[in-house]
Image (cartoon, rainbow, N blue to C red):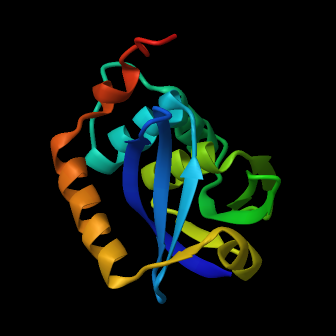
Amino acid sequence: MREVEVVGVRVEMPTNQPLVLLREVDGGRYLPIWIGAVEASAIAYAQQGTVTPRPLTHELMQSIVEALGDELDAVQITDVREGIFYALLIFASGAEVEARPSDSIALALRSGARILCTEDVLDEAGILATTDEDEEIEKFREFLDEISPEDFDKPDPEA
């Protein structure tokens, strides 16, 4: 397993599809995972530390885990098949729960859990950054500084 960190979320054009971009902590690979708009908002809220007046789903999940006396140790992105990613939530109690990577990442950001990815997934779906791509990543970071989670809630004008 390799540790990855969340670079951020963005909307990929021209498809208007949100994605979360992960970066290998001790390496040069990036892992883009296409996700839903709700999950993109949840990840962006968590990254920005936005406090909501009522708990959102991932905040509720974190509260339930704590109320049951457990804690999320790690999220593992374990597989990718036909473009679909799979993940596991690993709890201190030893429990493991299958989950979508987007939900897993949103929960990990709220709980401070590590995000891990198998070498096989990084080999298959990871992208090795070049100098040009590093510049694109920097533009992406600048984009993240200007975007808010509410931007993912806008209706699609073509829908």
* Left or right for 156, reference 120: left
Residue 28 in percent (x, y) is at 46, 85
Residue at (55% x, 78% y) in the render? 3
**If the image is split into quadrants, where does the N terminus sit?**
bottom right
Residue 127 is situated, as x and y percent measured from the top left of the image, at: 54, 74
Vertical placement of residue 10 versus 108, above or below: above
Judging depth in this view, the residue of 69 and 118 nearest the camera is 118
Q: Residue at x 36, y 17 (%)?
A: 154
Q: Residue 124 in the image: x percent, y percent? A: 72, 73
Q: Say which residue appears at 24% left-offset and 34% top-offset.
A: 148
Q: Is residue 113 above or below residue 18?
A: below
**For this view, does 131 lie left or right of residue 56?**
left
> Is 31 above or below relative to 54?
below
Observer-nearest of 32 and 73: 32
Q: Is residue 135 left or right of residue 25?
A: left
Residue beneath the point at 60% across and 72% down:
126
Q: How many marks?
A: 0
Which residue reaches farthest bottom?
26
Place residue 35 in its image quadrant.
Answer: top right
Q: Position of residue 70 (x, y in %)?
A: 65, 53
